[in-house]
Amino acid sequence: MSKKKILSIGLKVDHPNVTYDNFTHFRSILEFDIILFDPEIILSEFIRQYPTGNFMPSEKISQFNLACEERDREIKQFLNLERTIYINMCSPIEFEQSGRKQRISFNPLSFFGIKNIRARKGSGIDITFKGDNLYNDFWDKVDGIMYYNAYLVDSDMIADAKPIFYQGNTSNIVGVQFKVGNCYVLGLPYPNLSNPFYIGQFIDALLELDEKLHIISGEIALPEWVNLYRLPGEEDAIKAINKDEQDIIKLQGKIKEDQLNYSNIRSFKSLITESGDNLVSKVRDVFILLGCDPIDVEAGRDDLLFKWKDKYICIEVKGVDGSAAEKHAAQLEKYVALQIDKKSIYPKGVLIVNAFRKTPLEERDPPIFPEQMMEYSISRKHCLISGLQMLCIYQNIITKPESKEGIMQQILDTVGRYDKYNNWRSIIKKTSNTQEL
C-alpha cells in the first residue's frame, strides 16, 4: 500500500493513510501529499441553514475570514508542489452575513486556483466514464459508489481542463481534471461513505490514481523495497528535505501568528464601517483595553455597561449612513434611567455613533452630532463620540498604553461632543496600496 499521507478536510474517513481536519483547526496541508476536500464543511462549521437561505452569524464572520486567509496562503504554496488535491465538486455556497445585505458566494474551485468556473447545482448517481485511459482502474474501483452534487457544461470549461465523468448520457460534466501550477486538482463526485468497504475501496483507488498522475508528470513510482538501498548523496538529500519541511512548519507557525495579529488589527476598522453586533463588539473591546470591566447585559442589545474604578458607564452604540440624531441620545437616556431604576447606580451616559459609515473618511461631512441634538445631550451630561474617534483612541492606547487613564477621565468629564482625536490623519495613514492579505 502507498505510504502517501492524505489530509481530509470535511470528509470523515476511517483509513490508515488519512488524517481528518475541519476547516478551522488548521492542520498544515504542507505536511501531506494529497488533500481531500469537501466544501460543504463550510456549511456545518460557519453557517446556519434556514428555509429562506443560508446565514452566517456575526460571531462566525471573523473566524471564517481568518480560516480562509490561512488556508489560502498554504494552498498557494501547495499548488507549486507536485501533489494532488481532490475536491468533492459542488456549486458555490451562497450565504448572508450578519449586518450585511450583500450575499457572499464561496466558490470551491476558485478557492483552489481554478478561476472563472462555477459548478451548477444538480445531483444524482447516473455517472458515465469518458476520461483518459489513465482513469480506467480508478473507475473500475469506484463505479457504483459515487454520486454527484454539481455539474459543469462545455461552455464552463477552460483550455487545460480534462473531463473525466459525465452526467449519464448527457454532455454535463461531473468529474474533471485541472492542472494548476505543478499540482493536479481533481473535481470529483462524492464517494458513498456509508459502507466501510466502500471507504477503503475509494481511498485505495485515489492512492493508485495519484501514483499514475505523478508518473505522467515525470516522477517515477518505485517499489517500496528499493528504499532499503541508498545512492551517493541520496541520504543527504533526504536530510535536507526533512530539515526544509521542519523549517516550513516553523515558518507556517510564525505566519499563523502574524495572520492572527493582522486579522485582529484589521478587525478594528469595523469602528468606521459597521453597525449592529460587529460595531458593538469592537466598541466593547476598546473599553476593555481602556481598563473598564464589562457588566453583562442582554444579548443582541446596542448598549453596553461598564465599571471603571468606582464609576459606571452606560454606552449606546449606533452605526448609521448619515449623522447622529436626537433619537439616539434618547435611547441612551432610557438605558441610563433603566440602570438607575434596576441597579440603583448613576452611570455616565456615552453615545457612540459610527456616522457616515459607508463614506470614505475624507468625504465625511461634519458635524457627526448635529446642533439640534446638543441641548438634549448636554442637559443630560452625555459624552458624544464618533466611531472614527473610537478608532483613533484604539490606535493611541496600542502605541501609548500609559494614556488609558487620561482618556477614560476625559470621557467621564466630557459633556457634549468629545473634542479629542478630531484630526484622524495624524494617527491613521492613508495609502495607495489597497492590497489585502
Image (cartoon, grey):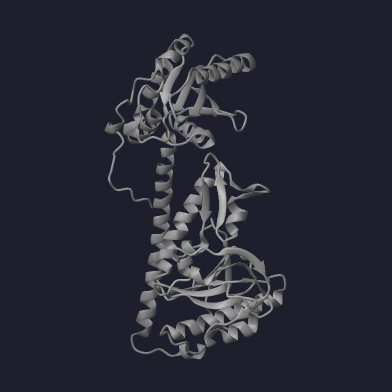
Which image quarter: residue 125? Answer: bottom right
Q: Nearer the viewer, residue 1 or 214?
A: 214
How many numbered discs sit on the rendered protein? 0
Task: Specify the quadrant that holds the N terminus.
Answer: bottom right
Q: Residue at the spot x=38%, y=52% of the render? A: 437
How far across and how far down the image is residue 296, in percent?
Answer: 59, 29
How far across and how far down the image is residue 4, in percent?
Answer: 52, 77
Q: In this picture, is 242 found above or below 350?
A: below
Q: In this picture, is 55 found above or below 162?
A: above
Whether residue 405 is visible to the viewer of this picture, yes or no, is yes
Q: Does residue 136 appear to the left or right of 323 in the view shown?
A: right
Q: Does residue 332 appear to the left or right of 323 in the view shown?
A: right
How far across and how far down the image is residue 137, in percent?
Answer: 59, 86
Q: Residue at the spot x=36%, y=36% of the render? A: 360
Q: In this picture, is 50 found above or below 242?
A: above
Q: In this picture, is 36 found above or below 97?
A: below
Farthest residue to the right: give it. Answer: 195
Whether residue 309 is visible to the viewer of this picture, yes or no, is no
Q: Residue at the spot x=58%, y=75% of the render? A: 171
How far across and how far down the image is residue 350, in percent?
Answer: 47, 20
Which image quarter: residue 242? Answer: bottom left
Q: Nearer the viewer, residue 349 or 115?
A: 115
